[in-house]
Image (cartoon, helix red, strand yellow):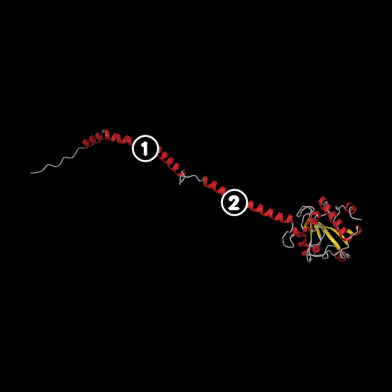
Amino acid sequence: MSSAAPSRPSARGSVQRIAEVQRSPAPMYFRYAARSARALRPRFRAAQGQHFAARSLRPITGRSSKPAVARRRRRITRRTRIVWAAFAAATTLVTGVLILGDGGAPRGLVAASQGTIDDLAARRSGDPVQPREAALDRARWKGIVIHHSGSPVGDPDAIERQHLSFGYASLGYHFVIGNGHGYGDGVIHVGPRWNRQQPGAHVAGGDGPWYNEHAIGICLVGNGDRRPFTDRQLRELVALVRRLQQSLGIPAGAVHLHADLAAVNSPGRYFPAAEFEAQLLR
């Protein structure tokens, strides 16, 4: 008994079934969904990018860093105030020592031997020219010589360093009077040679040895060839010279400018020689 071979679908039937499937509602829905997805994809990607960008800008901890910056600034401000307060206190202390003199200060401190003629008189029992480390040698001193430092600014320490570089044992002048540039205007510095009643090292020329041994050297800070000295400098100079004349019996004829004794321009062409000489004791 022969079995019948299975029937194959005809080509026409296959085409019909494909057409029916294509016309069915479900495939139409999927095709519409696919088209909609393709249309919405650019919008979705843009929204997704904005979402991640917003998250990347959000602080990690969720707390602002402004309070920390403000606290740091406050710490810096407090530290700066402390430093400036310490600096002001140190400056005040040093200034007080320089003004009040050497009450308990070590010997050699500049404040112990500086001031106007009245200040020196108050500190030295009424005698501004009284030496601090030796008795006044009245037999030694026969004259006075006036100098300038040759520089527009300066102080006794700077002048002494220069003299040490020349080989001197210490400051060569007995007195130095400041001009307000590096040293107080009109402030008189009493040098160690005067306090110890030692010869000076301030006069050049052939007669220098005798004048260094017997004449008191007074230096005005400044350059008298370039500009005049200050009024206060000259006022304190006259007061000091008159006091030395009075204490030591030095006549006006024994008060010299350095230029009178050596081939130098000290104390310079702006020094008022005639006015100065008119105020000396006769």
Q: How far apart are the alpha carbons under marks 1 and 2?
A: 65 Å
Q: Tag 2's secondary structure?
A: helix
Nearer the N terminus, badge 1 or badge 2?
Answer: 1
Kind of residue indicated by mark 1: Arg
* Coordinates of residue 179 in the picture (x, y in percent): 79, 53
Say which residue appears at 69% left-offset and 53% top-offset.
Answer: 92
Kind of residue indicated by mark 2: Arg
Mark 2 crowdedness (10 Å alpha carbons): few <14, some 14-19, many ≥20: few
Say which residue appears at 73% left-offset and 55% top-offset.
Answer: 100
Residue 136 in which image quadrant: bottom right
* Coordinates of residue 228 in the picture (x, y in percent): 83, 51
Mark 1 vs 2: CB contact within 8 A: no
Kindly identify which residue carries mark 1.
38
* Coordinates of residue 117 in the picture (x, y in percent): 81, 55
Residue 188 in which image quadrant: bottom right
Q: Which mark, by number, is residue 27?
A: none
Which numbered mark, 1 or 2, is in the foreground of this view? 2
User: Is residue 230 in sight in this rendering?
Assistant: no
Can you say which quadrant of the picture contains the N terminus? top left
Which of the two residues, 247 or 56, is positioned nearer the viewer here? 247
Q: Tag 1's secondary structure?
A: helix
Mark 1 crowdedness (10 Å alpha carbons): few <14, some 14-19, many ≥20: few
User: Is residue 90 in sight in this rendering?
Assistant: yes
Which of the two residues, 27 or 270, is positioned nearer the viewer here? 270
Q: In screen coordinates, is 57 left or right of 103?
A: left
Kindly identify which residue carries mark 2.
79
Which of the two residues, 82 or 204, is positioned nearer the viewer here? 82
114 shown above or below 56: below
* Coordinates of residue 36 in the picture (x, y in percent): 35, 35
